[in-house]
Image (spheres, rainbow, N blue to C red):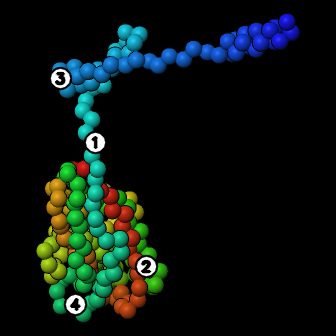
């Protein structure tokens, strides 16, 4: 009798502590105008307005680009840089823009940064331009500004390749043969 009573108490305890769990049955349907309607088992409807288009953006570009800037360059553009190849492997058009730029001129005593390419004798300016070959002039340059900015550099359609080059200007009093760095934060977004 003790065993039966113990068994019944155990079963009663299991039932007392258990809770019924039911899945909320949902039905999905198209509203006819491209929106999605979610119907729950309680009769409530939730409507998602808009279109969900999953997109994977894949863009390839170099992460480090060394360049030389020298007053001895005969052209208006005083920078020699390798071409910056950019490949859009996405199935959507993309825009590449500069979100932020950090400039370190600590090795160039008495030199300041210029944001527009019109340099004074103690200034340096660097930018990027879309081109097929190393540009000789500064036309079309997108100048890098110290700090926050939102400068569009390049638009690429799906599966397109593009090229950019670094361009720059250097003032007559800026010391040469010194190292400085310009670190732009490039952002890719769907165009």
What residue would you read off at disc 3? Answer: 33
Mark pair 1, 3: CA separation = 19 Å
Residue 71 image position (x, y, % from top left): 27, 90
Mark pair 1, 4: CA separation = 48 Å
What residue would you read off at disc 1? Answer: 54
Relative to 110, residue 30 above or below: above
Tell me the crowding category of disc 1: few under 14, some 14 to 19, or many 20 or more residues within 10 angstroms, Cα based: few
Relative to 56, residue 145 above or below: below
What residue would you read off at disc 4? Answer: 73
Name the mark nearer the viewer: 2 or 3: 3
Residue 131 image position (x, y, % from top left): 15, 72
Side of 119 where 102 appears, left or right:
right
Relative to 186, residue 9 above or below: above
Q: Residue at x 39, y 70 (%)?
A: 183
Q: Residue at x 25, y 30 (%)?
A: 50
Residue 37 image position (x, y, % from top left): 29, 20
What residue would you read off at disc 2? Answer: 105
Name the mark nearer the viewer: 3 or 4: 3
Mark pair 2, 1: CA separation = 43 Å
> Of the residues under marks 1 and 3, which one precedes in the sequence?
3
């Amino acid at each position: 009798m003790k065993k039966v009573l113990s068994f019944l108490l155990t079963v009663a305890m299991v039932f007392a502590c258990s809770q019924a769990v039911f899945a909320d049955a949902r039905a999905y349907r198209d509203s006819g105008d491209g929106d999605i309607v979610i119907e729950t088992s309680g009769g409530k409807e939730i409507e998602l307005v808009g279109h969900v288009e999953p997109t994977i953006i894949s863009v390839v570009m170099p992460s480090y680009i060394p360049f030389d800037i020298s007053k001895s360059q005969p052209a208006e553009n005083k920078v020699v840089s390798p071409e910056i190849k950019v490949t859009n492997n996405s199935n959507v058009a993309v825009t590449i823009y500069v979100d932020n730029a950090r400039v370190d001129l600590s090795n160039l005593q008495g030199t300041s940064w210029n944001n527009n390419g019109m340099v004074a004798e103690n200034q340096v300016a660097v930018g990027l331009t879309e081109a097929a070959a190393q540009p000789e002039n500064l036309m079309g340059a997108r100048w890098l500004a110290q700090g926050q900015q939102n400068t569009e550099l390049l638009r690429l359609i799906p599966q397109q390749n593009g090229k950019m080059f670094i361009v720059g200007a250097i003032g007559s009093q800026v010391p040469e043969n010194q190292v400085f760095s310009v670190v732009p934060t490039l952002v890719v977004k769907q165009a």
